[in-house]
Amino acid sequence: MTDVAASDFRNPHRYVRLDTILRLRWLAALGQLAAIFIVAQGLEFDVPVIPCVAIVGLSALLNLALQIVFNPMQRLEPVYAAALLALNIVELAGLLFFTGGLQNPFSFLFLAPVLISATALPIRLTIALGILAVACASALVFFHLPLPWDSDDPLVLPPIYLLGVWLSILLAIGVTSLYAFQVTEEARKLSDALAATELVLTREQHLTQLDGLAAAAAHELGTPLSTIFLISRELEKTVQDNDHLAADLKTLREQAQRCRDILAKITQLSSSGAPFDRMPLSTLIEETVAPHRDFGVAIKVRLAVAAAREPVGARNPAILYGVGNILENAVDFARTTVEVNAWWNADSVEIVISDDGPGIAPDMLKRIGEPYLSRRPSADEAQNGHSGLGLGVFIARTLLERTGAKVSFTNRIFPDHGAVVQIAWPRDRFEADEAAGGTET
């Protein structure tokens, strides 16, 4: 019931395919050539065509060389992807130098490489690209050739306007990139946490399948072992005159009986009942409580006596893991006692797990169950300056909600202290077969 190692998911390596960068660079080169052609031929403005085409041509040659030398489908290290995006910024700065600097409306394209980095690369590289873009924009305020325009009616923009353009570029790079990075990071965290959930569920399903196979094997092997035991006992009676053979038959009978005893224990440890995949609520609770009884915390289990019969549900790995993980947290944070209360009626089934620990911090109550949310510190963790990542609670809540449960987190009412977790199912969902209601998404 332990948490998945969240470090494997929290800081994944971020790789961008070379093909993705090359497509963007080819698109930029074609757009730049089209802009130069339209301004020079369509609008008939005086554009320094040769240096501008030279910059675009060098960019195209680099794209072609990268496409030939390297496999476009390979994933680039973040630093190499950032280097290509930085080259885009420098190329754009060169084109703007020959076409009016920040007076050119295309100066806002400085935002594009930084925004791409914010969605795909680590934050340190995004900050570096943002600084480079701002530095290039700042240099273009002072150093640039005149903006291509009608020579009979030259365009002269006041310095205050250029300052406003520079400031708007700066703010656009900062605010937009920060927003894109935050949205992408949250989506990535959720995706990684859901991947961890699937791994946990798959592991629990494998364990349950092994348990069922062991019970089925014990059931199937029981008959041939009984036959071997009976035949060996009858043969032992007929060869009493041969001490050596009688001793071998006695050993065979004893070993057959030993195998029968082992299979009987396996059957007892596995699910009770004929298909080995159904369990009453009391058995579910006892199976999740048993591994946590020897940790110095008293676990009190109370089952309410109701007029309706006890609910019997599928042996669902999602429920076993979810309830077990929440119970494990309660034991970790409890001072002396954990209470597990369960009751049911004709319409619903409910389990409430509470402890006498420090409880959940008020600012975390509304966010509890989110991936990578730090847990409330236990007494030992508070002394050691250590706290968990909250991935286990997210996995438990996700798995339980997939089975139709509603999970809520509260604190005990003052003067009592401690956390209370309420897990409630509609009775028909709890008693549904696992295939029908236990693993749907």
Image (cartoon, rainbow, N blue to C red):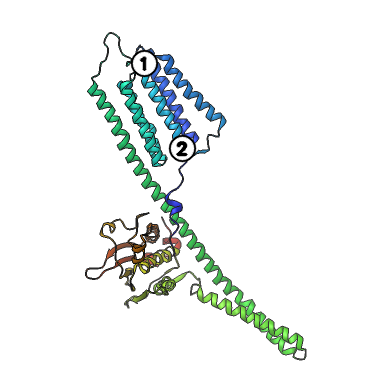
Q: Identify whether 230 is placed above or below 44.
A: below
The residue drawn where x is 65% and y is 83% is 254
Q: Which of marks 1 and 2 precedes in the sequence? A: 1
* Residue behind mark 1: 39
Q: Identify whether 182 is placed above or below 288.
A: above
The residue drawn where x is 67% and y is 83% is 253
Q: Find the distance from the CA under tag 2 to the CA under tag 1.
A: 36 Å
Dot 1 amino acid type: Val
On the question of residue 341 being in view, the answer is no
Q: Identify whether 95 is placed above or below 67.
A: above
Which quadrant is home to the N terminus? bottom left
Marking on residue 96: none
Q: How far across and down, in percent of the image, does residue 186 sit?
A: 36, 47
Horizontal side of 151 relative to 280 (left or right) equals left
Q: How far across and down, in percent of the image, does residue 259 sit?
A: 62, 78
Task: Name the one closer to the observer, 127 or 302.
Answer: 127
Q: How far across and down, in percent of the image, does residue 90 sit?
A: 41, 26
